[in-house]
Image: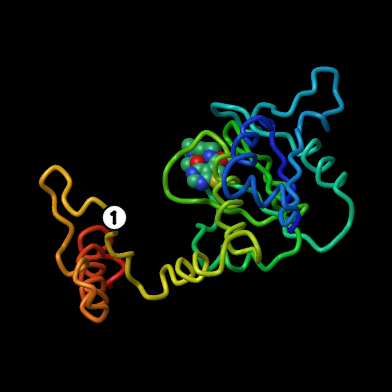
Amino acid sequence: MRVDVLTIFPGIFESPLRESLLGRAVRSGILDVRVHDIRDFATDRHRQVDDEPYGGGPGMVMKPEPIFAAVESLGAGERRLIVLSPSGRRLDQALVRELASERWLVLICGRYEGIDERVVEGLPAEELSIGDYVLSGGELPALVVLEAVARLVPGVIGKEESHERDSFGEGGLLDHPHYTRPSEFRGLRVPEVLLSGNHAEVERWRREAAIEKTRRNRPDLLE
Ligand code: 9D3
C-alpha cells in the first residue's frame, strides 16, 4: 500500500515510521510511506502556508494553493484523499478495514484553525476525525490512521495476532483481562481458574470478565 502524507511538520513522522510495527512494514516494502512538506509547494517569497480567515476571527487558516500543488505533484492513479479534521467522520474499526483495502491513501494534515474548505470541496477529499477531543493538528491523527490501517495490510503482522484483534466492536465486548507470571505480585493473585489448565473454565471466565469490564468501562457497547 502507498500512503502519501502532506504536512508542515514532516519531522513528527520520523520516529513512528522507524520504530516497531510501522518501521518494519516500511522497511519490508509492504508499506510505501512518503512524507511531503507542504511548505515546499508554497511559491511566494516567504513560503507562506497560512493566512488570515475571511470573515475575521482568531487564528490562521491553511491556504489551498500549496496543498493542491502538493496533491497534484503525486501523479495520477486511483487514490483516496483524506483530510484529518476534528469536523470529520469519526474513525472506527469498520472504516479502518475499508481504508486497508485501498491501494493508495493520501493523508492531509491541517494545523492552525483548519484548512481552507476548498481543499475538501475541490480536490475533493473526505474529512476524518479520530475522536471527540481537541489536538493541535492532524499529524498524530494521521499516524493513528496509518498504524490502525497498517495492521490490517497482509504481511504486516503475523496471522494469529491479526485474527485476534480483528473482531473489535463486532463481538460488542472489550477484551478480557490478561495476566502473566508471577502468579502472585505484591499480594495480588492471578485468578485461580487461569492456572487450572481447564480450557472450558478459562473460556467461561474470560467471557464473564469481558462482560464485566465492558459494563464498567464502556456500558454504551452493551446498549
Ligand atoms: C474552535 C474549534 N476547534 C474545532 C474543534 C478548532 C480546532 C481544533 C483543533 C481546529 C483544529 C484543530 C486541530 N485538530 C486536528 O487537526 C485534528 C483532530 C483533532 O483535534 N481531534 C480529533 N481528530 C482530529 S483529526 C485532525
Give the tally of numbered discs: 1
Rendering colour mode:
rainbow
Disc 1 residue type (three-letter): Thr
Give the quadrant of the C terminus. Answer: bottom left
Q: Position of residue 128 (x, y in %)?
A: 58, 53
Q: Position of residue 124 (x, y in %)?
A: 74, 56
Residue found at x 74% / y 40%: 35
Identify which residue, 187 or 9, lies in the foreground: 187
Q: Position of residue 161 (x, y in %)?
A: 49, 64
Residue found at x 84% / y 40%: 69
Q: Which residue is mark 1?
A: 180
User: Toward which corner of the image does residue 12 lie, by quadrant?
Assistant: top right
- Indicate left or right for 205 with 105 as reference: left
Identify which residue, 93 or 40, lies in the foreground: 93
Residue occupying the far left of the picture:
187
Q: Position of residue 198 (x, y in %)?
A: 22, 77
Residue found at x 54% / y 26%: 58
Which type of secondary structure does the marked residue at label 1 adopt? loop
- Indicate left or right for 57 with 67 as reference: left
Against 120, residue 210 (above or below) is below
Residue occupying the far top of the picture:
46
Label 1 CB, ligand 1: below 8 Å?
no
